[in-house]
Image (spheres, rainbow, N blue to C red):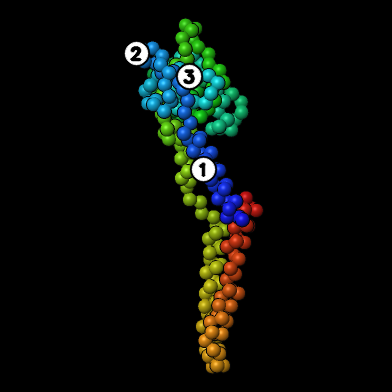
């Protein structure tokens, strides 16, 4: 029953992660022919698009014109909307997503409102990264391929099992000559040897350790 519940939960979580990673939407791209409606899956770094309002962003953008109010709760957990301003043209600093977050719209965040510049042009954004190279993509990548976590509890548990196994082996080697001298038959000798190992190393120990970790979490 526990294995079935764990399997169902894993399938459900993988389905949610797949939907989150494969998010696409229709977006207006600026081209030589003007604004063209395209699917966000065809966007590449360097494309200029109109920042959509009232939906999640499919990629990381740097704001070129106007301003925007976004909800970054998906990334930071902060429910307070954040104001984003356009990248200054006169600045001599090089753009960096890590140090210029006030000009960056991150993929997966929701755009609450866009405010065009005084010339009434649409709010444009420059695509800087797509797919797994975005901030959202890095989160999905960490979920799919997490770093191995080593708990001291497990290492101590393995040491305990090893010590008990050594004690069971020593006890088996010490009692075997006595049982042979007493004329114990081979089936009974094997049976008592297995009983000794089972007593020293309980079969329910892995299940008990798993339950302990689950309740501790």
Q: Which residue is mark 1?
A: 14
Viewer-nearest residue: 67 or 109: 109
Q: Is residue 77 left or right of residue 44?
A: right
Q: Which residue is rendered at x = 57% and y = 48% of the image?
A: 8
Task: Say whether disc 3 or disc 1 marks the residue closer to the N-terminus.
Answer: 1
**Residue placed furthest toward the top:** 119
Q: Secondary structure at mark 2?
A: loop
Which mark, by number, is residue 32?
A: 2
Which mark, by number, is residue 85?
A: none
Q: Residues within 10 Å of mark 3 (few under 14, many from 20)?
A: many
Q: Which residue is mark 3?
A: 51
Task: Say whether disc 2 or disc 3 marks the residue closer to the N-terminus.
Answer: 2
The x and y percentages for residue 7 are 55, 50
Q: Is residue 197 above or below residue 152?
A: below
Question: Given contact means CB atoms under 8 Å apart, are the residues at marks 2 and 3 in contact?
Answer: no
Tell me the CA gap for discs 3 and 1: 30 Å
The x and y percentages for residue 80 are 61, 26
Q: Quadrant of residue 45?
A: top left
Q: Which residue is rendered at x = 46% and y = 9% of the image?
A: 121
Q: Nearer the viewer, mark 3 or mark 1?
A: 1
Viewer-nearest residue: 38 or 75: 38
Q: Is residue 178 above or below residue 114?
A: below
Question: Given contact means CB atoms under 8 Å apart, are the residues at marks 3 and 1 in contact?
Answer: no
Q: Quick check: can you spot residue 12?
A: yes
**Residue placed furthest toward the left:** 32
Q: Quadrant of residue 12?
A: top right
Q: Which residue is rendered at x = 56% and y = 90% of the image?
A: 184
Q: Quick check: can you spot residue 93?
A: no
């Amino acid at each position: 029953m526990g294995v079935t519940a764990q399997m169902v939960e894993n399938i459900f979580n993988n389905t949610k992660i797949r939907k989150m990673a494969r998010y696409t939407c229709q977006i207006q791209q600026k081209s030589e022919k003007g604004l063209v409606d395209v699917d966000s899956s065809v966007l590449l770094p360097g494309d200029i698009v109109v920042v959509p309002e009232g939906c999640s962003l499919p990629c990381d953008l740097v704001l070129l014109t106007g301003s925007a109010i976004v909800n970054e709760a998906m990334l930071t957990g902060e429910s307070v909307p954040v104001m984003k301003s356009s990248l200054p043209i006169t600045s001599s600093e090089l753009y960096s997503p890590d140090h210029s977050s006030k000009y960056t719209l991150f993929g997966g965040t929701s755009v609450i409102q866009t405010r065009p510049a005084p010339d009434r042009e649409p709010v444009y954004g420059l695509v800087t990264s797509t797919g797994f190279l975005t901030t959202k993509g890095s989160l999905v990548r960490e979920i799919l391929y997490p770093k191995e976590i080593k708990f001291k509890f497990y290492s101590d548990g393995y040491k305990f099992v090893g010590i008990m196994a050594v004690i069971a082996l020593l006890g088996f080697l010490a009692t075997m000559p006595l049982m042979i001298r007493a004329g114990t038959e081979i089936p009974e000798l094997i049976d008592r040897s297995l009983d000794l190992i089972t007593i020293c190393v309980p079969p329910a120990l892995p299940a008990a350790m798993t339950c302990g970790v689950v309740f501790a979490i």
